[in-house]
Image (cartoon, grey):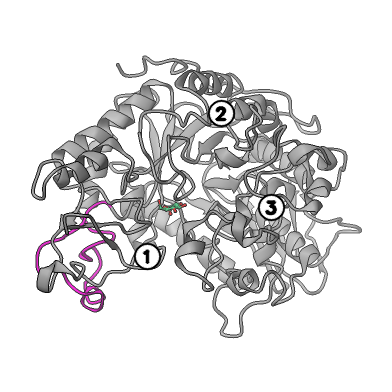
Amino acid sequence: MAGAGAGADAAPDRRAEGDGDVERDGAEPKGADWWRQAVVYQIYPRSFADADGDGIGDLAGITSRIPYLASLGVDAVWLSPFYPSALADGGYDVDDYRNVDPRLGTLDDFDRMIRALHAAGIRLVADLVPNHSSDRHEWFRAALASAPGSPERARYIFRDGRGPDGALPPSDWQSIFGGPAWHRVPDGQYYLHLFAPQQPDLNWDNPEVRADFVRTLRFWSDRGVDGFRVDVAHGLAKRLTDPLPSTEEMAGFGPGAHPLWDRDEVHDIYAEWRRVFQEYDPPRTAVAEAWVEPDRRARYAHPEGLGQAFSFDLLEANYDADGFRRIITDNLAFARESGSSTTWVFSNHDVVRHATRYGLPVPADGGPQKGREWLLSGGTEPVLDREGGLRRARAATLLMLALPGSAYLYQGEELGLHEVIEIPDEDRQDPTFFRNAGVEIGRDGCRVPIPWTRGGSSFGFGTDGAHLPQPTWFGAVSVEAEERDDASTLALYRRALALRRRLQGPEQLHWLDAGQRPVLAFERPGGWRAVMNFGPGDVTLPEGELLLASAPVSDGVLPADATAWLRVP
Ligand code: GLC
């Protein structure tokens, strides 16, 4: 079984031609350690490329764009959920874990896509959503059709209500998307949904649930999937003994003991998964999406667990030299502790794009700028500095790409895309918008189908429109426009990724005294240096060969909000 499926033996072996200005010398780690310093590109499949012209991106669309991914120089693609789904939460409501949404294609299309990715030297990381299924999953339908107390209900978390006639929910818990976390079914029982009501939480105390996910891991691993991104990895294990604690009481539980989140025993599940991953050659990998305190992250990243965990510390930080330096130092220390490599990410499908966040002022209380007020104001308050935001985003990304560890990129950031604000209410799709009227706008603005061409139907996304409206400014930041511009963000990413491949060495970093503030400077093994000037003034670069910069450098002067890579002999 292990390693037997289509494409499983197509060892990713570099690779299609790049933009030609740097050589690829195949310096990337081969074999089992490929993920440690990989550049992983997140594709939100319904918004990447639409081959069949129904307005929704699909797997054949992705396959058709593999030359683009190869020319960008990514090591792996992380594919957000592509499973059958009613899209109550952008595909994170899964009807069937071992199939492809018919609107996105078939299992044969999946096999074709993975073979073509592997042939281009690109690995595939599949998104796995184990905390909850959708309410259309056959198990949940069976649970609704069965009596309270039945084995069918025991795959989920059903409880009787409180109060006379059980009219009150079992507890006062709120869902992450707003509103109560319990939903009542016709016979009076309630089920738990920590996210939308269409996402019932699975009961991970039930051995049947555990066995079924192992089957899913093997199903995709046999088809050649190289790794998994594990959604809400900190949520699976729950302690739901009666009486259920109130939200207020839950706040008092210490690390590892909270009834719902980040419980210590969740790692028993991942230890079992790890044994499955090790059946394959190379072993399958996993990265945890776990919103936990930084000092709890190492457990998820442990080699006997999932093996790697996202760090969202940079994504949540303001643009600030001291803050960046502290985060980098801490995360490298956490990685040493776990034996894993560090991860870095600025943008994904859940947050306002970083070009936009960095174009907004730091809030008066010094807290993180998440772009929430800007979204709520329809993009007017505070005023967005579009150019400055992009400039800072390019600088930050070039710093990130010089760090040891894996870099996770989100589709469209290589074009320097800003968050799309121009989405009428009636076109919005995100449940956070519907469940928090007037309080949250939601995540649709980073999920708008990306522009491939300057014009045409849906800017080259497909032949007949896009499922979220695209703004007129998309043409100027399309792949077509940026490929013709040597100073574009796309050109910067391509050069950076190609150079990184050549320069990448051991996972070490040595801070340098930049002598000027606020400037960060460090050296990687082999004399590769990165210098980032957070502005507002110019800084003089140290001696060395200038390899790449996020903004023009002349006479050895690095302007504000720019990063340069240098090589010293
Ligand atoms: C994760 C996903 C997010 C989704 C949620 C519920 O946080 O990244 O998009 O809404 O899980 O599945």
Position above or below: 489 against 514: above
Q: In this view, does 565 lie to the left or right of 234?
A: right
C-alpha gap between disc 2 and disc 1: 36 Å
Image location (x, y in percent) of residue 237: 22, 53
Other residues around mark 2 within 10 Å, as few (<14) / some (14–19) / many (≥20): many
Position above or below: 427 against 80: below
Q: Which of marks 3 and 1 is nearer the N terminus?
A: 1
Ligand 1 within 8 Å of disc 2? The answer is no
Image location (x, y in percent) of residue 223: 41, 21
- Queried whether the magenta region covers residue 110, the answer comes back as no
Region rendered in magenta = 236-264
Helix, strand or loop: magenta stretch:
loop
Which residue is tagged 3?
A: 398
Q: Which residue lies furthest to the bottom in this view?
A: 364
C-alpha gap between disc 3 and disc 2: 30 Å
Q: Quadrant of the N terminus?
A: top left
The residue type indicated by label 1 comes to Glu
Which residue is tagged 1?
A: 293
Residue in the image at 72% along x and 74% along y? 380
The residue type indicated by label 3 comes to Leu
Q: Earlier in the sequence, mark 3 or mark 2?
A: 2
Q: In this view, does 320 lie to the left or right of 107?
A: right
Image location (x, y in percent) of residue 124: 50, 31
Which label sits in the foreground, 3 or 1? 1
Q: Residue furthest right?
A: 555
Q: What element carries label 2?
A: helix
Q: Specify the label residue 59 is tagged with.
A: 2
Q: What element carries label 1?
A: loop
